[in-house]
């Protein structure tokens, strides 16, 4: 029974971050596409209504991304590994790519653990 408990704990410890990474990547990709669309519309002199509709479309996905980022940052800060390295770099790059939207909709980008993780693991460069 004790070995079974250890195995289940170990398996969940390994599989949970992988699961969270996989569910976080899809919303981030969708959000990136919406943000890029918004930037293009802004350049094409989109109407205020167009921009308002785009903002309404971005908000729910940004909230999902923010929640997923927060969970991933916590998990990765607690147990660094190579898969977390890739995830944290992706989060950091997304945060840098769209600063105007991030500041408003994705506060997890300002999480000090994100930058600390990247600095400690020597991933910025």
Image: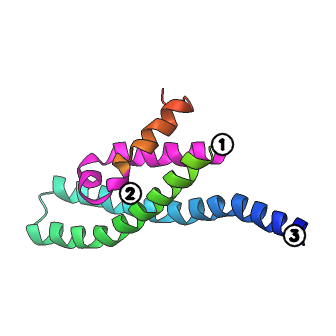
**Residue 77: x percent and y percent?**
54, 46
- Calculate the distance from the C-alpha at mark 2 to the C-alpha at mark 1: 24 Å
Residue hosting label 1: 82
Q: Mark 1 or 3, which is nearer the eye?
A: 3
Q: Secondary structure at mark 2?
A: helix
Q: Earlier in the sequence, mark 1 or mark 3?
A: 3
Q: Quadrant of residue 17?
A: bottom right
- The disc at residue 99 is none
Q: Residues within 10 Å of mark 3 (few under 14, many from 20)?
A: few
- Left or right for 73, reference 46: right
Front residue (pair 6, 96): 6
For the point 47% across and 62% down, the residue is 68
Please give the range of residues in magenta. Answer: 82-108
- Left or right for 34, reference 3: left
Regarding residue 61, the answer to whether it shows in the image is yes
- The disc at residue 32 is 2
Whether 18 is drawn above or below 76: the answer is below
**Residue 125: x percent and y percent?**
48, 26
- Left or right for 43, reference 77: left
Residue hosting label 3: 4
Q: Mark 2 or 1, which is nearer the eye?
A: 1
Q: Main secondary structure of the magenta part?
A: helix
């Amino acid at each position: 029974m004790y070995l079974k408990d250890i195995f289940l704990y170990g398996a969940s410890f390994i599989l949970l971050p992988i699961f969270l990474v996989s569910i976080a990547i899809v919303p981030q990709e969708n959000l990136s596409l919406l943000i890029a669309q918004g930037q293009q519309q802004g350049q094409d002199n989109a109407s205020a209504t167009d921009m308002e509709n785009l903002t309404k479309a971005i908000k729910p996905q940004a909230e999902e991304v923010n929640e997923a980022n927060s969970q991933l940052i916590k998990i990765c800060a607690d147990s660094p590994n190579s898969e977390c390295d890739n995830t944290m770099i992706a989060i950091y790059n997304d945060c840098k790519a769209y600063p105007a939207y991030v500041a408003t909709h994705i506060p997890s980008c300002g999480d000090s653990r994100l930058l600390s993780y990247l600095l400690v693991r020597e991933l910025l460069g």
